[in-house]
Image: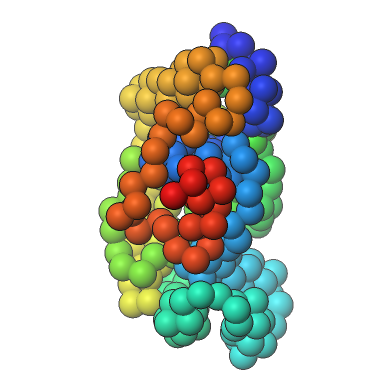
Amino acid sequence: MLDKSVFEKFDLLPMSYSKLNSFFNYPCQFIINKIYKIDTGNNPAMRAGQVVEELLHDALLKKDIYMDKTLLHFEEDFCAYHDQDQVGKYLEYIPKMYKQCDNFLKQLGNYQLHSYQEMIETEILGINFIGYTDFIFDLDDELWLYDLKTKARMTSPSNSEYLQQWIYKKALEEKYQKPVHCHLDIVTPTKRHCEELFFNDNQEIEIHNKIKGMSSMLEKCQTPEDIALLYQPNLDSWEWNEQNIPARKQIWGI
């Protein structure tokens, strides 16, 4: 078991897979958002994914879909966004990605929707984790979990997506005491791909190693400044834009 206090020192509990993934793959963004608690806002790609999920949820509940109103709200939310070309691109993508969900509705629309955006909780190495699932369907003796990913282009399920779903599966099976089958449903403006995910010991080992690695780093640091000194920003990285550069200057001075 790990020492919770090293995570509490930087107000990182409860942990989530998104925090863990951000720390290892985008450490400077993690430092900005989770260590210094600077909100750099949403972006069109992330919000578009949320919008498609919400539309799909409404459709599963047999609610009317008002696409024009949805797109208007999206445009209003990003009226001051620094990259209006991105906003325009995702205004075009949202109805196309939602259209690719037609087969999802045909395949699953008659099953009982157990929950949407259900908060899950579990403990890994003594560290509390939370997360929010997408669509869970109840088949009496088992649960089917469908995680919707919207992407500009089709890619195979990533290792990161496997690890996130492993945590969800662990938490749901602990809570409901029944098997959980995890599915990754990927939609782009032109394609849909869905597959069931199968796990082995590697996912648990990798998650344990990542948590131990973060714990070791946090144990050695006493202040946010200590952490920032360990991870210097690469100024050529794609992540620096009008939203993030002011935060970078505040923390690293460059």
Q: Residue furthest front?
A: 253
Q: Is residue 16 visible?
A: yes
Q: Residue at x 62, y 40 (%)?
A: 36
Query: Which residue occupies 71% across, 77% down?
Result: 63
Q: Position of residue 110 (x, y in %)?
A: 60, 65
Placement of the N terminus among the 4 image quadrants:
top right
Q: Residue at image x 49%, y 46%?
A: 253
* Residue furthest bottom as drawn: 68
Residue 124: x and y in percent read 56, 21
Name the colouring of the figure: rainbow
Whether residue 237 is situated above or below residue 94 in the rendered picture = above
Residue at 38% x, 76% y is 189
Tally the marks.
0
Which percent across, then down, holds residue 52?
55, 71
- View extreme (top): residue: 1
In this orientation, which residue lies closer to the viewer: 185 or 235?
Answer: 235
Q: Position of residue 4 (x, y in %)?
A: 64, 16
Residue 212 shown left or right of residue 152 in the figure: right
171 horizontally vs 189: left or right: right
> Which image quarter: residue 111?
bottom right
Please say whether residue 169 is visible from this viewpoint: no
Residue 202 higher or lower than 159, as above or below: above
- Seen in the picture, residue 177 relative to 236 is either above or below; the reply is above
Left or right, 238 with respect to 104, comes to left
